[in-house]
Amino acid sequence: MTEPVEVSALPALDVASRIPKLRQKFTTAVETSGKSTADGADAIAPGPIDGLVVTKLEHLRYLFGFTGSAGLGWIGRDEAVLITDGRYRHQAAAELEAAGVSARLEISRTPRPIFAAAAEDACAEVVGLEAAHVSWQSATSYRGWFEGVDLAPTIGLVEGLRAVKDAGELARIEAAAKVADAALAEVRTLLVQGPTEAEVAQSLEQAMVAAGASGAAYDTIVASGPNGANPHARAGSRRIEAGDLVVIDVGAVVDGYRSDMTRTFSIGEPDDLSRRMLEVVTEAQAGGVEMVRAGVAAADVDKRCRDRIAEAGWAEAFEHGTGHGVGLDIHEAPSVNSRTQDVLLAGHVVTVEPGVYLAGHGGVRVEDLVVVTEAGARVLSQSPKDPVLAVG
Ligand code: ZN
Ligand code: ZN
């Protein structure tokens, strides 16, 4: 086992620069409706905004360094306010201070007057609400909070910033990938001992925590035999047996940042069909990774994987997108699929994860987490791609 990850030894996050960068988008977000921005994520706002209401917890974490489970943020042109309740009084103050973020902390259970005053102080005419994260019901009540102010839906403002990772973020994602690698290395020997899928998933999650993760990045997938034909199968009570393909999709969380990786194993020698699936998907995946580079259209990476699988006659059996961004969320910008207009930028972290799923037989998916650089992909997932596990 490698030494457990020490978060304090990782490079610091550059939290303080983020609110100023977000403010720059209050005007540049205009008239980009429907088009991809330089960040690679769609940014839509019907006009310049004077302030933004932030409700999504990952955005509060990203912008303020605040890791509590309840809070709201105001980002005005000159002022930023973090509002949370008494449970987080000390934590929020300490986190703002540690991050060096210049923001006012308000401890209150009634944020309405705080927002109203902040909007008035800013002479705000238009306030943005994050359309992807505010329910219809909340949007309706916000109308009452901001009297005489226009509310405008914004899409992708914070997500676009989040898509490009700084050194501290990359270090955390890389550490999370290492933790998942270590867990898989430890648990792969268990696979030939007839465990249930759920036992394997639990062992992986325990190993990740022992290696310094705060937990699993998502419900670990262990899908054996015919269950593997369902791309998002949950780990269940099925016992893994000789002849199975086993899809294992596992990721860790380190200091809020996630990793995401899939390997497929064959328990004993694979039959001809399984062997061909493993070969085709492994090749398709390697082709996709090879295409990753700053400036490349993400849709072209998807096409490269999809074409190889189609060539093998399995176009219909690859029914999901090739990949997605990973960071504070397990699925975030940019998208890697056939419909996206996103362009890969240096500092993006994306997965490349084609698969083939055959009902009644099983599935194969191979997924690496990679950092986009000017020179190509820096692959974070280091688990070997040698799928055949000897039995007995
Ligand atoms: Zn995955
Ligand atoms: Zn994934």
Image (spheres, helix red, strand yellow):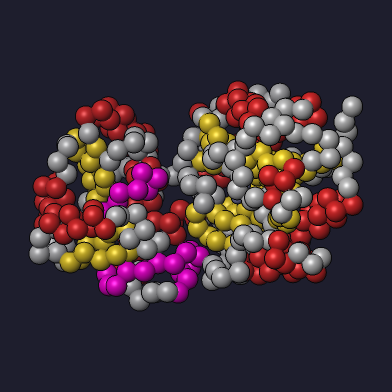
Question: Viewer-proximal residue, 311 or 227?
Answer: 227
Q: Residue at x 10, y 64 (%)?
A: 148
Q: Magenta stretch: give its range.
A: 35-59
Q: Is residue 163 left or right of residue 144?
A: right
Q: Position of residue 89 (x, y in %)?
A: 24, 29
* Residue 235, quarter of picture: top right
36 magenta-colored: yes
Counting the numbered discs, the total is: 0
Q: Position of residue 183 (x, y in %)?
A: 67, 30
Q: Can residue 337 be seen?
A: yes
Q: Residue at x 27, y 30 (%)?
A: 88
Q: Is residue 270 left or right of residue 378?
A: right
Q: Position of residue 188 (x, y in %)?
A: 76, 31
Q: Main secondary structure of the magenta part?
A: loop
Check the image and report above or below for 9 versus 384.
above
Q: Residue at x 73, y 55 (%)?
A: 358
* Residue that lies at the very extreme toward the front in this rendered image: 360
Q: Position of residue 274 (x, y in %)?
A: 83, 50
Check the image and report above or below for 265 versus 31.
above
* Residue 218, quarter of picture: top right
